[in-house]
């Protein structure tokens, strides 16, 4: 999964394959404005350590945070779904 600091896949990008308990500690931003899920299913959480509102991410391109149902771009943590 690739996350971006700006809409439409702009700005700084980081690629992740594993869980991230604190987006800020790894990315130095609290806001994720766009995302490209290339493989697997992920859950975004509003706060660090997998707390708060959750957003289910399927493979695909999310050009703006509203594409995944977000009310704002702040994401505190995320993890990959392992079991269905």
Image: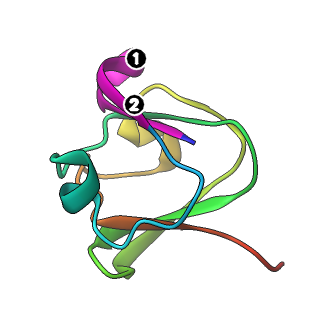
Q: Is mark 1 on a helix, strand or loop?
A: helix
Say which residue label 1 marks. 8
Vertical position of residue 8 compared to residue 62: above or below = above
In the picture, measured across the screen, residue 54 lies left or right of residue 32, that is right
Residue 69 in magenta stretch = no
Residue at position x 61%, y 60% in the image: 42
Residue at position x 45%, y 65% in the image: 78
Q: In which quarter of the image is residue 56?
A: bottom right
Q: Quadrant of the N terminus?
A: top right
Vertical position of residue 8 compared to residue 45: above or below = above
Whole-Å distance between the Cαs marked 1 and 2? Answer: 7 Å
Q: What stretch is highlighted in magenta?
A: 2-14
In the picture, measured across the screen, residue 5 lies left or right of residue 2, that is left
Vertical position of residue 9 compared to residue 59: above or below = above
Q: Residues within 10 Å of mark 2 (few under 14, many from 20)?
A: many
Residue 5 in magenta stretch = yes
Verify CB contact (< 8 Å) between mark 1 and mark 2: yes
Task: First in sequence, mark 1 or 2: give its number.
Answer: 1
Q: x%, y% of residue 67?
A: 49, 37
Nearer to the camera, 70 or 75: 75
Residue at position x 36%, y 67% in the image: 77
Say which residue label 2 marks. 64
Q: x%, y% of residue 10?
A: 32, 16
Q: Is mark 2 on a helix, strand or loop?
A: loop
């Amino acid at each position: 999964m690739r996350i971006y600091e700006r809409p439409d896949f702009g700005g700084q990008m980081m690629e992740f394959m594993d869980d991230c308990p604190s987006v800020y500690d790894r990315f130095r931003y609290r806001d994720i404005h766009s995302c490209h899920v290339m493989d697997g299913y992920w859950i975004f959480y509003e706060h660090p350590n997998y707390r708060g509102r959750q957003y289910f991410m399927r493979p695909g391109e999310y050009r703006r945070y509203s594409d995944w149902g977000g009310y704002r771009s702040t994401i505190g943590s995320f993890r990959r779904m392992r079991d269905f």
